[in-house]
Image (cartoon, rainbow, N blue to C red):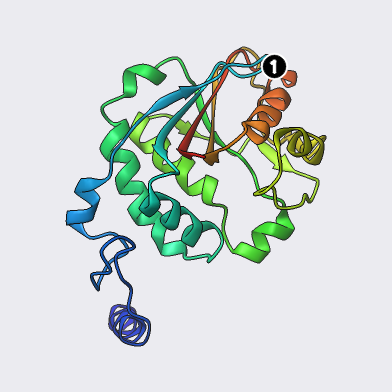
Amino acid sequence: MWGELKNIYIFMKDGLFPIFCVSCKKEGTFLCEDCEKKIIVNPKWQKKSKDISGVYTLYSYKEECIKTLVELFKYKHIEELHFLFHKLLLSHLVHKKELFLHYYYIVPVPLHKRRYNERGFNQAEYFAKSIAVALNKEYFPLLERKKYTKQQVKMERKKRLHNLENAFVFNREFDTIQGKNILLVDDVYTTGATIEECAKVLKDAGANIVGGITFARG
């Protein structure tokens, strides 16, 4: 019964609200096979800091289809895009496991509950779960976001750091992470302020090494 209802829902949704490839506008998918093959995976390590050993970024935000897909996911709240991101992440990271062998937990950058309710999901959680699968690591939401902050899209690094001050706390429901190596996950690396603030909290909670990985870089 549920299977039939689900098929009817999908048929009605696709008929009333058809989707198109963000690159070539071909109907039926957010990214067609031909355009997916044209995407350039250009991984780069971003700078180290006091609390983070480096951030591995996969795609450039300057690639228009990557930017469009992330913005549809993050700001238009099109949750079903997580299937596509999962595919893109796995296709690259399953061949890069050796870069992340020393990490113990995969941890998403958290959303404040208010922002989570506005969006309906945390995009970083989807990325983190996919990365945990690709790298065969454990996924744990070790952080909470206690402070509701302004959107940071147009903020420079100094303002972002001030905006994020004391925004994150360690989730004490989990056991100690003393001496553990943690890999933080977010959607886009811009100035590094968010992921660095999260790394600071994890280091203060006892983490040994904290690294990061993001789907794209701005």
Asked whether 129 or 158 is in front, the reply is 158
Decide if residue 78 is on the left or right side of residue 36. Answer: right
Q: Position of residue 115 (x, y in %)?
A: 69, 58
Asked whether 180 or 121 is in front, the reply is 121
Point 47% across, 62% down: residue: 72
Furthest residue in direction left, as rendered: 34
Amino acid under label 1? Answer: Gly
Asked whether 161 or 64 is in front, the reply is 64
Q: Position of residue 34 (x, y in %)?
A: 17, 55
Q: Position of residue 79 (x, y in %)?
A: 47, 63
Point 33% across, 17% down: residue: 98
Which element is circle 1 on? loop
Tell me the quarter of the picture where residue 31 sits: bottom left
Residue 184, placed above or below residue 123: above
Q: Position of residue 92 (x, y in %)?
A: 29, 34
Q: Which residue is mark 1?
A: 206
Tell me the quarter of the picture where residue 184 sits: top right
Point 37% across, 49% down: residue: 85
Tell me the quarter of the picture where residue 52 sits: top right
Query: Where is the N terminus found, in terms of image quarters?
Result: bottom left
